[in-house]
């Protein structure tokens, strides 16, 4: 077995002494994490020490980087993401915070911004304040403190939540009637990423008119020595206790207050559910927090049940995520499945949650249930079991199972492009809003995707129906039809307008043309081009291809009506990308 004596040799290709810019610290960390994970228990502390030493270099880069981000600041479908130390560092997040304050100052003279911001003046924003938090990533407290110092220097009230989930921060924003929130998180991206999420007063992902302005202003400010709202010599790491107008915020308590307040709209009796869960000898919940921000509050969320009711997995602090991709996925669901298989309980519920707690995927111990299925189940549950009436909202890349449910129930479907902010027009009318990337919210709750509401809803389904989620899904599919979605993505070198121009090559596949799927030619009967290109085929299967809004990737999504066709549709999507030149 490799020993720590070889550490220097393993990391030296990635580290240039006294040169942050040329060093690739996270490649070194990945090598060390791989060695730590396969090492014997007695050897792991030595590997961890080596990881900590590299992280100390990352911390120094975060503090001292005074240049421009390696990639231009850009807010996508869910905020700004980039490499920690290279893109997100003290000065760059301070600059973005200054750009946000500039937006509110501009609103003093531009009333057209008031509706999107939810405030009418800079003074109102200062008084109502900002909810501030971060996920479990390395450097989160440092970056949040930089934001706090900029806000405090400009007399903005701060509700400091510390490490918290996206959904809880959104609830905190609503309960405290704050003007906006800032969450330092790149969501489910790999360990080397950091991120910056900004939500306006409605607590949902910011409207494009706002993020476009922030992007433009931040890019401009990055090139300046003197930046508005950043006083010369401002200490971005002045301790929180020395800052004025800071309120310590319990984001989970705000979340709990919000779900109780919305009971008449969504029909979930949170306190009764927790009481039944605690008293039951039938139900077992297993949650894999994947080391993320949810790990510290899951027990509180579920009423602090004993180990006979709740099993927590990967609930220790680890910003490396054990070297895995920290997302709700079939691969990451394996641990919960294996854990539940060893337990005896009539009603089992397993879940895996991403680092900032805005995505969740489920299992009942046997069947894996992605949001493509769960979103349709949630809509059916609120509509038919809770007796609520209203539409369902789903992104265009999500399964058409929800469409089939809505059609038979006589309800509308709202189907916008990818991005939770696209649900804003129907947030008060849709019973459920969900996207295939495992994000969900419900009426009467936050307009932000939230793993916690998904978990509570799944527990309520299991409790109310007295059956595993897999059995409920089977009933729904038997009644409304079977759908088999899949997705994948490829990293590409092209970005921006160049990438869009290349993808325009797919425009030749229009209504009436055919796509080869396996050994068959299938005719396109409908094209939806609001977000990339979704080509619906004559048998109601479909292929969708779109550029990612947060990473240098092209994503493709497919859905078959016959399970054996799913892999064939994936191959067909790859062939279409190859035609454009994006794949070899």
Image (cartoon, rainbow, N blue to C red):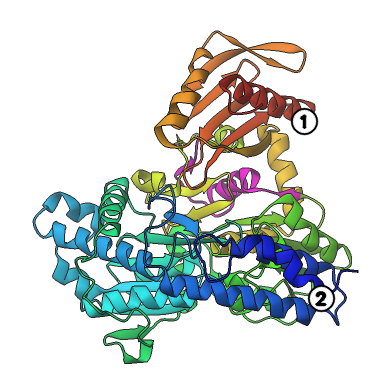
Residue 353 visible in the picture? no
For image coordinates 53% across by 71% down, the residue present is: 18
Q: Read off the magenta span.
A: 368-396
In the image, farthest residue toward the front:
17
Query: What is the quadrant of residue 281 in the picture?
Result: bottom right
Mark 2 Cα-neighbour bin, 10 Å: few <14, some 14–19, many ≥20: few
Q: Nearer the viewer, residue 207 or 135?
A: 135
When the figure is inspected, residue 151 is found, relative to residue 486, above or below; the finding is: below
Does dot 2 land on a helix, a strand or a loop?
A: helix
Queried whether the magenta region covers residue 371, the answer comes back as: yes
Determine which residue is flagged by label 2.
5
Q: Nearer the viewer, residue 394 or 553?
A: 553
Query: What is the quadrant of residue 338 in the picture?
Result: bottom right
Tell us which disc is closer to us: 2 or 1.
2
Determine which residue is flagged by label 1.
563
Queried whether the magenta region covers residue 53, the answer comes back as: no
Q: Position of residue 72 (x, y in %)?
A: 38, 50
* Callout 2–callout 1 Cβ contact below 8 Å: no
- Quadrant of the image containing the C terminus: top right
Q: Is residue 261 left or right of residue 37?
A: left
Tag 1 or tag 2, which sits nearer the N-term?
A: 2
Q: Which mark is residue 3?
A: none
Mark pair 2, 1: CA separation: 50 Å
Does dot 1 land on a helix, a strand or a loop?
A: helix
Q: Position of residue 144 (x, y in %)?
A: 41, 74
For image coordinates 69% across by 57% down, the residue present is: 465
């Amino acid at each position: 077995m490799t020993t720590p004596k070889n550490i220097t040799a393993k990391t030296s290709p990635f580290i240039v002494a006294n040169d942050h810019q040329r060093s690739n610290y996270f490649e070194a960390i990945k090598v060390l994490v791989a060695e730590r994970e396969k090492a014997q228990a007695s050897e792991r502390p030595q590997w961890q020490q080596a990881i900590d030493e590299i992280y100390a270099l990352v911390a120094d880069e975060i503090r001292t980087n005074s240049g421009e981000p390696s990639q231009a600041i850009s807010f996508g479908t869910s905020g700004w993401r980039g490499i920690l130390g290279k893109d997100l560092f003290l000065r760059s997040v301070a600059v973005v915070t200054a750009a946000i304050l500039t937006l509110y100052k501009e609103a003093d003279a531009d009333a057209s911004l008031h509706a999107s911001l939810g405030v009418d003046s800079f003074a109102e924003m200062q008084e109502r304040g900002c909810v501030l938090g971060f996920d479990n990533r390395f450097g989160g407290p440092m970056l949040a403190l930089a934001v706090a110092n900029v806000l405090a220097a400009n007399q903005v009230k701060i509700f400091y939540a510390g490490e918290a989930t996206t959904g809880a921060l959104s609830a905190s924003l609503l309960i405290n009637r704050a003007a906006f929130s800032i969450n330092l998180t790149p969501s489910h991206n790999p360990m080397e990423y950091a991120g910056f999420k900004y939500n306006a007063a409605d607590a949902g992902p910011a409207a494009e008119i706002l993020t476009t302005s922030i992007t433009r202003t931040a890019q401009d400010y990055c090139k300046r020595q003197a930046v508005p709202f950043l006083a010369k010599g401002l200490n971005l790491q002045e301790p929180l206790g020395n800052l004025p107008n800071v309120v310590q915020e319990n984001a989970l308590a705000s979340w709990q207050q919000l779900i109780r307040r919305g009971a008449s709209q969504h029909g979930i009796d949170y306190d009764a559910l927790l009481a039944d869960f605690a008293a039951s000898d039938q139900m077992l919940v297993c949650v894999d927090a994947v080391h993320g921000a949810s790990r510290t509050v899951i027990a509180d969320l579920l009423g602090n049940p004993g180990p006979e009711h709740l099993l927590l997995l990967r609930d220790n602090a680890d910003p490396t995520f054990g070297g895995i991709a920290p997302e709700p996925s079939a691969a990451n669901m394996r641990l919960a499945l294996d854990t539940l298989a060893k337990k005896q309980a009539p009603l089992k519920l397993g879940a895996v949650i991403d680092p900032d707690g805005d995505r969740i995927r489920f299992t009942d111990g046997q069947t894996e249930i992605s949001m493509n299925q769960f979103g349709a189940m949630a809509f059916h549950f609120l509509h038919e079991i809770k007796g609520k009436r209203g539409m369902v909202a789903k992104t265009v890349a999500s399964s058409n199972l929800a469409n089939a449910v809505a059609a038979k129930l006589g309800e509308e479907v709202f189907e916008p492009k990818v991005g939770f902010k696209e649900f804003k027009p129907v947030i008060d009318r849709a019973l459920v809003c969900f996207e295939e990337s495992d994000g969900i919210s419900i009426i009467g709750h936050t307009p932000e995707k939230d793993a916690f509401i998904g978990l509570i809803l799944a527990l309520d389904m299991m409790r109310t129906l007295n059956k595993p989620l897999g059995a409920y899904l089977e009933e729904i599919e038997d009644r409304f039809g079977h759908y088999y979605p899949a997705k994948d993505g490829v990293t590409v070198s092209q970005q921006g307008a160049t990438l869009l121009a290349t993808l325009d090559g797919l425009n030749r596949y229009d209504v009436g043309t055919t796509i080869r799927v396996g050994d068959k030619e299938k005719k396109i009967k409908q094209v939806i081009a609001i977000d990339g290109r979704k080509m619906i085929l004559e048998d109601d299967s479909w292929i969708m291809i779109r550029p990612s809004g947060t990473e240098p990737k092209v994503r493709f999504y497919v859905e078959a009506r016959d399970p054996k066709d799913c892999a064939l549709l994936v191959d067909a999507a790859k062939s279409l990308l190859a035609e454009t030149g994006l794949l070899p």
